Amino acid sequence: MERTNSAVTRQIVAMGANEFEIGLYKPEGAGNGEPPMIPRTWDMQTVLKSIPWLRLQNRNGRNIYIRPRGEHNLSLIASTQPSGLDRPHVHLAQPSVDHGVGPYFETVS
């Protein structure tokens, strides 16, 4: 669990926001009476205190999404291979968060 806490802390600190929109998505939820999306708006401390609950929701099939609340200057480049970020037409600011998801990377800058 310490690895998860560390990763979540690095991600939300790098985003540089005070409040975050959290979405817990389960596409098949509507078919069995559950809401497909559970939205939350939390500050950093609430996100960190909620990691055990978020992990439980993820184990139960929900995808967890997080972004700064309101307008922000971050861009998400999702599911790209590392070589895709080296192409001349890709101009990124210094990435705030860069992590692997299987053979792919997600970068927020």
Image (tube, grey):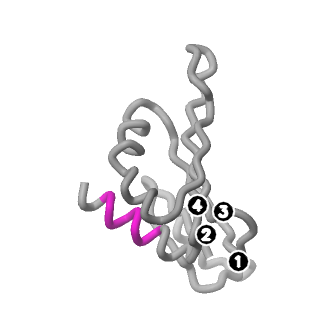
Overall secondary structure of the magenta section: helix
Quarter of the picture holding the N terminus: bottom left
Q: Earlier in the sequence, mark 3 or mark 4?
A: 4
Question: Does the residue at mark 3 contact the one at mark 2 (Cβ under 8 Å)?
Answer: no
**Mark 1 residue type:** Val
Question: Disc number at residue 90?
Answer: 1
Name the spot of residue 102 as percent of width and height, x first. Answer: 43, 53
Q: How many marks?
A: 4
Q: Are marks 2 and 4 in contact (CB under 8 Å)?
A: no
Going from N to C along the chain, the mark reached first, 2 or 4, is 4
Give the number of the disc on residue 84. Answer: 2
59 horizontally vs 80: left or right? left
Amino acid type, label 4: Phe
Instruction: Indicate whether 56 appears above or below 101.
Output: above
Residue 6 located within the stretch drawn in magenta: yes
Q: Position of residue 64 (x, y in %)?
A: 51, 46
Residue picked out by circle 4: 20
Mark 1 or 2, nearer chain start: 2
Q: CA distance from mark 1 to mark 2?
A: 8 Å
The mark lying in front, picked from 2 and 4, is 4
69 vs 58, left or right, is right
What residue is rendered at 62% in x and 35% in y? 37
Point out the image quarter for the C terminus: bottom right
Specify which label sits upstream in the sequence, 3 or 2: 3
